[in-house]
């Protein structure tokens, strides 16, 4: 993201690294198993401990199938329509490895579509399935995290998971969802059904999830549905996420075995990945232990620990545990407002989330205000929205949508997935966005389009097959004559007359403008007919009252065509003294 954002300098750039994940938590859990009878189980990867792998790359799975006599089929399954699956190629004696409890090295096809898959092992009896746990993606030096904090579903004011979060988070095209525990409230009327619903919910995000265990979470159900162990790592490109078991019922600084494991996981020789920690506790007990030992600065730097994501119901206020967090600088500490409608412990009753872009040693945080608040505030649900024109279910050959940004910050790297009916598998055209990924599945095409949105701005995009509709061939040139006056020149570069309706916006307001060549008053939206090769100049005054001093985006939209978007120009506004 760029434009109005908060940038936090973290630690240490990193080199390009292979995308093969070591599932430390699962190995730890398997080591604790007794010698008795073992049940069939897929132990790694899992919903809350995903693996990232590039197309054509490999990863390691851990599973146990006692009594297996012949090799099973190992496949990746895309559940969301159109459903498709792909066989994986294992190495070594798979039958023996599964009888003994793994691990098994597998390779994914080179042409595998980039998305997040279920992993299934199909042998005699019921298949073993781990939901939404294999992310096929090329990940390197830049990732986007979305943090979801305590949900407490089953509370009287949060009877179910917030469905609206799924679409809004998916619009952000995250690399990884980070969830910091307390998923179900202790008063949930049916905890088994609640955990089943939680698995389905997290499986509908476009990205996989790294999920911590909280003090409200049943450890047995967590191990069945999320991960066998409450601790573990996920490696993705230049980054390593370390999830900890640290909550008021199990403070980490009293767990010597876990601390030993953490220090090994964060200090891999010749590994310069930037580490981020994920835990439920609001108090970073690991940092407190290191401080009490007089080793905090040394440990943080040696572990390349740059980001700490904590649970809780509210944004971190910059005061709680401030002395400890300051002593761990340049580590960035993040606490995010509750991601559900529950009204407890000072929350608003509106779900929130946080967006953090990590780029080597830098963290960019999208904020809901013009001011760079420290610490940054999280985003309320409704900050971004994608509105479909019709149904996006693969039955139409043309689909349109409007994307809306209600934040006073530019939002970049957004994405939408469109499924078109396309029996001939022709390449679709796109207006208003860019086609980033295309997968043909039978008579349908799955299209991933990407785009940016200016502050308080929007766009309308259309994608389809066959003949593309004609767009007005009008160019837009924005110039500032003075600090309070902008000129907008519109030029018809086509060979036919065209009709457009310009809108000029600043900070979410439509600005009145006038035609420079005419002696008329100002208008908000003027319908213009431009002959071929002709230009027209608009003049708009930049208001200062009601605006704080700062940089804003002056936006020009040309309505009237099948798609529209903003031509933007930064404007320095000097607010009233």
Image (cartoon, grey):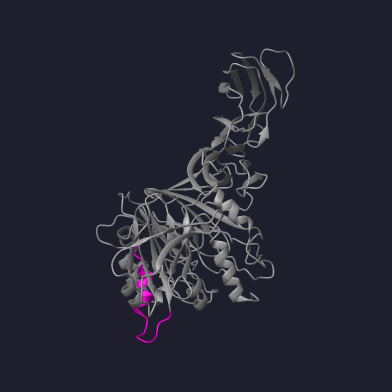
What is the x, y in percent for residue 319? 51, 60
Q: Which of 130 and 396 is in front in this view?
A: 396
Instruction: State whether residue 382 is above or below residue 97.
Output: above
> Viewed as shown, does residue 476 lie left or right of 22?
right
In the figure, is residue 267 to the left or right of 241? Answer: left
Residue at 55% of width from left, 56% of height from top?
A: 80
304 sits to left or right of 483: left
Residue at the bottom extreme, as displayed = 36
Residue shown at the point (66%, 47%) measured from the top left: 391
User: Residue 200, image x and y in percent?
Assistant: 57, 64
Quarter that holds the C terminus: top right
Magenta region: 21-39
One can see residue 185 in this view: no
Q: Is 365 a magenta residue?
A: no
Residue 34 magenta: yes
Image location of residue 173, percent across then percent down: 51, 49
Give the number of callouts. 0
- In the current view of this chain or complex, which residue is farthest to the left? 270
Q: Residue 531 is drawn in which quadrant? A: top right
Camera-side residue of 35 and 88: 88
Q: Can residue 304 be seen in this view?
A: yes
- Check the image and report above or below for 562 versus 408: above
């Amino acid at each position: 993201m760029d434009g109005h954002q908060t940038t936090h300098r973290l630690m240490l750039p990193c080199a390009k690294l292979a995308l093969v994940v070591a599932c430390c938590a699962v190995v730890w859990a398997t080591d604790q198993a007794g010698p008795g009878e073992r049940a069939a189980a897929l132990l790694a990867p899992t919903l809350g401990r995903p693996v990232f792998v590039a197309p054509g790359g490999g990863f390691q799975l851990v599973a146990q199938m006692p009594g297996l006599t012949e090799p099973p089929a190992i496949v990746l399954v895309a559940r969301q329509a159109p459903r498709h699956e792909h066989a994986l190629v294992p190495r070594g004696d798979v039958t023996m490895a599964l009888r003994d409890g793994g691990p098994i090295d597998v390779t994914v096809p080179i042409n595998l579509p980039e998305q997040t898959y279920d992993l299934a092992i199909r042998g005699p009896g019921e298949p073993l399935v781990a939901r939404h746990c294999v992310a096929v993606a090329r990940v390197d030096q830049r990732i986007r995290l979305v943090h979801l904090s305590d949900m407490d579903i089953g509370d009287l004011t949060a009877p179910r998971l917030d469905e609206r979060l799924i679409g809004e988070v998916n619009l952000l095209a995250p690399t990884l969802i980070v969830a910091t525990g307390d998923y179900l409230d202790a008063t949930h009327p049916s905890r088994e059904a609640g955990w089943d619903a939680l698995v389905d919910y997290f499986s509908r995000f476009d990205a996989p999830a790294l999920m911590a265990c909280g003090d409200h979470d049943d450890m047995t159900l967590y191990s069945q549905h999320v991960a066998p162990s409450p601790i573990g790592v996920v490696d993705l490109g230049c980054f390593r996420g370390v999830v900890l078991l640290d909550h008021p019922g199990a403070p980490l600084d009293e767990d010597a075995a876990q601390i030993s494991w953490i220090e090994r996981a964060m200090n891999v020789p010749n590994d310069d990945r930037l580490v981020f920690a994920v835990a439920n506790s609001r108090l970073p007990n690991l940092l407190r232990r290191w401080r009490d030992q007089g080793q905090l600065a040394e440990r943080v730097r040696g572990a390349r620990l740059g980001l700490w994501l904590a649970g809780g119901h509210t944004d971190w206020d910059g005061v709680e545990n401030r002395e400890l967090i300051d002593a761990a600088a340049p580590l960035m500490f993040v606490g995010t407002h509750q991601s559900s409608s529950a009204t407890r412990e000072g929350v608003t009753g509106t779900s929130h989330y946080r967006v953090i872009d990590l780029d080597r040693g830098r963290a960019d945080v999208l904020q809901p205000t013009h001011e760079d608040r420290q610490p940054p505030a999280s985003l309320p649900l409704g900050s971004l929205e994608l509105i479909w024109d019709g149904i996006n279910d693969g039955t139409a050959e043309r689909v349109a949508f409007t994307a809306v940004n209600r934040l006073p910050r530019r939002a970049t790297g957004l994405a939408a997935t469109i499924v078109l009916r396309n029996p001939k598998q022709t390449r679709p055209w796109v207006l208003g966005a860019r086609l980033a990924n295309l997968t043909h599945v039978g008579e349908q095409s799955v299209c991933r389009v990407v785009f940016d949105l200016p502050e308080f701005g929007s766009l309308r995009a259309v994608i389809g097959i066959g003949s593309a509709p004609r767009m007005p061939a009008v160019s837009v040139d924005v110039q500032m004559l003075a600090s309070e006056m902008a000129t907008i020149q519109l030029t018809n570069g086509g060979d036919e007359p065209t009709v457009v309706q310009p809108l000029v916006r600043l900070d979410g307001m439509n600005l009145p403008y006038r035609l420079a060549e005419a002696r008329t008053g100002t208008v908000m939206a003027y319908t213009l007919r431009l002959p071929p090769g002709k230009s027209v100049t608009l003049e708009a005054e930049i208001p200062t009252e009601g605006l704080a001093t700062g940089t804003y985006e002056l936006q020009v939209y040309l309505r009237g065509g099948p798609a529209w978007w903003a031509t933007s120009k930064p404007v320095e506004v000097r607010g009233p003294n």
